[in-house]
Image: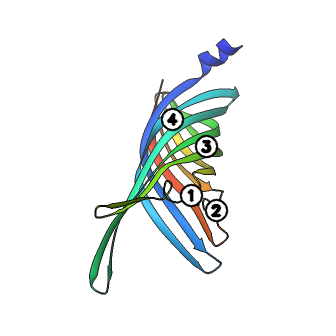
Amino acid sequence: MLIGVNAMAQASIGAGYLSSVETVKSGSSSTNRTPLNGFYVGMGYTIPLAGALNFTPGVYFGMASKNNVSSIFGLKLEGKQTDTFINVPLHFSFNAEIGSGLAFFAYAGPSASVAVSSKISSGSTTYDRLADNDSLNRFDVMLGGGVGLKFNDMVRFQVGYDFGMLNRYNSNNFTVKRNQLTAGVAFLF
């Protein structure tokens, strides 16, 4: 039975654009959103379950950053935030053939997310929010989904969105959550 599943399963290598938004909420009044842009790259493995239903686990590395430039009392302040993380999606998908060699698919499910680093730098000073601050949690569970098109079982284009479910800050005063938008291409083997 396992040999049959392996013969029907399909591996993929993908990459694309990543937009990550970190939302920091202080108490019940102020909210600050930091959008970060970057890329993701990784691999997945699609396993057919029943009919058009599939299960696709994967491992993806993501990196997103933002250059901050602001002015206070005429002084120009510059800085950069760079976040790197590993996402492990456990998605279920449904495929529907819409033409010769063309299929539409929709997917949904959870992803485990582990922050590798979260650095803020200004000039020659760098602060790693994970190494220097034990209140920031590395782990998150994201819930999301997306849609895409698959061409001739060779190339897949997809767009998805994931919502961070856990507070990544271990404090009663702050809530830190991360959501992400992805758009990319995958090559199927």
Whole-Å distance between the Cαs marked 4 and 2? 41 Å
Q: Depth-wise, is mark 1 or mark 3 nearer the camera?
A: 1
Q: Which of marks 2 and 1 is in front?
A: 1
Local SS, label 4:
strand
Q: In this view, does 176 lie above or below 18?
A: below
Decide which of 89, 54 is in the foreground and name it: 89
The residue carrying mark 1 is 134
Q: Is tag 4's residue or tag 1's residue first in the polypeptide sequence? A: 1
Residue labelled with disc 4: 150
Mark 2 touching mark 1, by CB under 8 A? yes
Color theme of the render? rainbow
Q: Which mark is residue 122?
A: none
Name the N-terminal-most of marks 2 and 3: 3
Check disc 2 and give the amino acid type: Asn
Label 4 close to label 2 by CB (< 8 Å): no
- Residue 153 position, x and y percent, is 50, 27
Q: Which of marks 2 and 3 is in front?
A: 2
3D distance between C-alphas at marks 2 and 1:
8 Å
Res. 134 image quadrant: bottom right
Identify residue for label 3.
Answer: 106
Residue at x 61% of width, y 56% of height: 164
Residue 5 place in picture, x, y as percent: 66, 18
Please name the residue that numbered disc 2 is placed on.
170
Q: Name the amino acid, label 4.
A: Lys
